[in-house]
Every structure is written in structure tokens, then in C-alpha cells.
Amino acid sequence: MTLQKAAVFLKDQNRALREEVYHKIQNRRAQDEEALNNLYSELITLRHKVALNTGFKNFRDYKHQSLGRFDYSVQDCLNFHDAVQKHVVPLVTEQEKIRKAKLKLNDYRPWDKEVDVEGKAPLKPFDGARDLITKTEKCFDSIDTYFGDCIRTMDKMGRLDLDSRLGKAPGGYQYPLYETEIPFIFMNAVGLHRDMVTMVHEGGHAIHSFLDIPLDLVDFKSPPSEVAELASMSMELISMEHWDSFFENAEDLKRAKRQQLESVLDALPWIAAVDKFQHWIYENPTHSVAERYATWEQLMKDFGSGVVNFAGLEANVKRRWQVQLHLFEVPFYYIEYGFAQLGAIAVWRNYKQNPKKAIEQYKTALALGYTKPIPEIYKAAGIEFNFSPEYVKELAMFVKGEYDKL
């Protein structure tokens, strides 16, 4: 069984089963711990050499320029780390305490983090790919019929490969096909809530591709992740206002929205920790594995809730960074998700205040592709490209306020 499939059991109401599966997953990861450490050490050495060969003092500074980050600085990334630690971590901590209380557990462990606190089975928003497509079209039509038309066009042209099946590659993505201009969505849906969220997320990317069709150059149609993920993450939150297409039961709808908003806040501290870890890694390229672990453990304290009891599981915490593929394959490509998540919250806030205007701004911004700098595209969307503590606090408190209403 794959780790992804095994992780589904972490939602099971049987606590003994959850614990067993947790340990099986961690034991499997432990088998490759040394190999992954050796690989990462080798990559760090090579990357530092690349930085020195190209006139940079470290790989962090090299990569910042290599990724084309013309619109924000290293200091902006550091400001993001601090703002998330100060204003988001306390909200996540509060939420974890509430979960622990609802589960009535004196000893709240890592295998208790995914289970439904009300003892309910996982949400089932659709049954099969055809049902997912039909409900997504209905949901998108409720926002803007143009969005529903995008899904219908893709469906008609055979550009939706959604169901999970034996031998199919894992994962999910949207991919633009420039010859015909109509994009493609690939995913492995099995009927879970997370599959529905993946569909509306990739649907946001697809709408972006449709809106970019009139642009003259392919490079104009390839915006950076800070913009591309704004399209998809905003659609997750905007569409949430119309998830009655997927959930007829009012309580299930509220539950789905709560899960979504919990994931929005949970993601930001992890993104900040992973990025801050990389800053330390490449500013200290000759560090030992012991120092690497010590740094990560401190970050987990800084960005963790402190509510989950990891006693006896310290080895799992130390190597947890190894689960993040980006560290190995695409260094420093990750904080973009944090910036885009902040933007998506702001777009959603605008939508709740004035739906018609917010959608007009959203479409205008996405239609720019990459013909403008990132801050100008965000401005066109009616939001700020801003990582200040004040702005992060403002958006985080908005999410909390909406969560509390549920």
C-alpha cells in the first residue's frame, strides 16, 4: 500500500488502527532516512558550488535571482516567516486545543490530528468522475457561467482524466496545451472531500489558461507561481460559497467549509517553516546532520502548536522535513504558496463583500498572464501583494472570524 493510501486510515474512528498505521508509515520513512540525509548533503554541497561559481555568496541568493523574483526580496520572505509565527501560529494552536477538547483526549497524539471530532465518516461530495464534473459545472455556473463553460469545453474535448484507476500515475495537476489552447486536468479522484477541493483548485488553473488564450506569446501565458496559485487557491475559497452543489445536507456543508478553513490556516506555518529551514540550510552549507536536525526541531517548536504530544516520537519529528519533496527537487520553490494563499484569502474577502466586482477583478487579473509585475497583477485583482505583520494578521483574523460563524 502506498503512503498516500495508508494515510486515509489516519481519518478512521478506530484510534488503535490510526496509531498502528501512523507507526507503519513512520517506520517505512525511517528506512530511507539515512539515504535521504546523504542525498540532501550532496545536493547542498553541489548547490553551494553553483552559487560560488556564479558569483553569489550562497545558494539562497543565487536561487532567489534564478527564480526570477524581481518583485520581492529575501527580507520579504523573512518578514513572512515572522508574521506567520506571530499571528497565525496562535490561531492554529487555539484550534488544536479545541480539537483535543472535542475528542476528549488527555493525551492528544499525531494520529489524532486527522480524525473527525464529531465521530462522523469522511465527507462524500460526489460519486465518480461524471458526478464530479456535473457538480463542478453547477458550482462554477453559480459563480460565473464563463467558469462553468470552461469545464464543459474541457469535458467535451476529452480533457478531464479524473478517476483513480490501477496503474495510473499519482497526483493531480492542470496543464495548458498551447496548440489547441484548451487545457487538461489530471487527477486521482476516489470520492473524498479532498478530491473535490483538488478539482476546484485545478479548475481555477484551467480558467486561468482560458483567460490567457488571447495573449501573443507563450511566455506571457506562463505566469509565476505567485500568480498561478492565486488563481487556483482563490477558486477554492470562492467556490466554497457554492458548495451546496456538492453537499445537500447543511451540516455536511458546514463541515466541509470548516475543514477548508482549517487547512488554509494550517498550511501557512508549515510553508513558513520549510522556507525558513532552507534559508538556514544554504547560509550554513557545511552544517552537520545533527545541526540540521536541531535546527528543524527548533522550527517545529516555533511554528508548531505544542498541543500534540510527540513523547517517544522525537525521531519522527526530527526527520519530518524529509516528506517535503520540494527540498530535494525544487529548492526554494514553496513560499510562493504562502504568498498566493494570503492573496486568495483577500480575493475571497472581496467576493463576500461584492461578488460581481470581485469576479470582474479576478478575471481581469488572470487575463494579464505574465505581462505585468506580480504586484500589479494582485492590484488588478483588487488585493495587495503584501507580507507585513499587520496584513497577515488582518487576513488571518478574517479567516478565523468566518470559521467561528460555522
Image (cartoon, grey):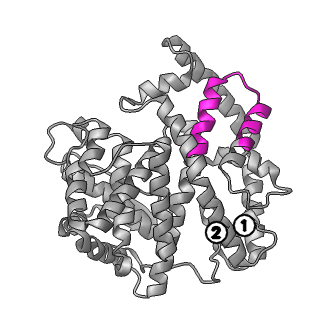
Q: Which residues are magenta?
A: 272-298
Q: Main secondary structure of the magenta part?
A: helix
Residue bearing mark 1: 111
Q: CA distance from mark 1 to mark 2?
A: 7 Å
The local secondary structure at tag 2 comes to loop
Query: Which numbered circle lies on residue 114?
Result: 2
- At 56% from the left and 15% from the top, the residue drawn is 57
Looking at the image, is 301 positioned above or below residue 219?
below
The local secondary structure at tag 1 comes to helix
State the image quarter where residue 296 is shown: top right
Task: Give how far across and how far down residue 384 sits, in percent.
Answer: 34, 46
- At 54% from the left and 65% from the top, the residue drawn is 262
Q: 285 or 325, which lies in front?
A: 285
1 and 2 marks in contact (CB < 8 Å): yes
- At 49% from the left and 22% from the top, the residue drawn is 62
Task: Give how far across and how far down residue 124 sits, in percent.
Answer: 48, 80
- Any magenta on residue 401? no
Task: Give how far across and how far down residue 5 sits, in percent.
Answer: 60, 65
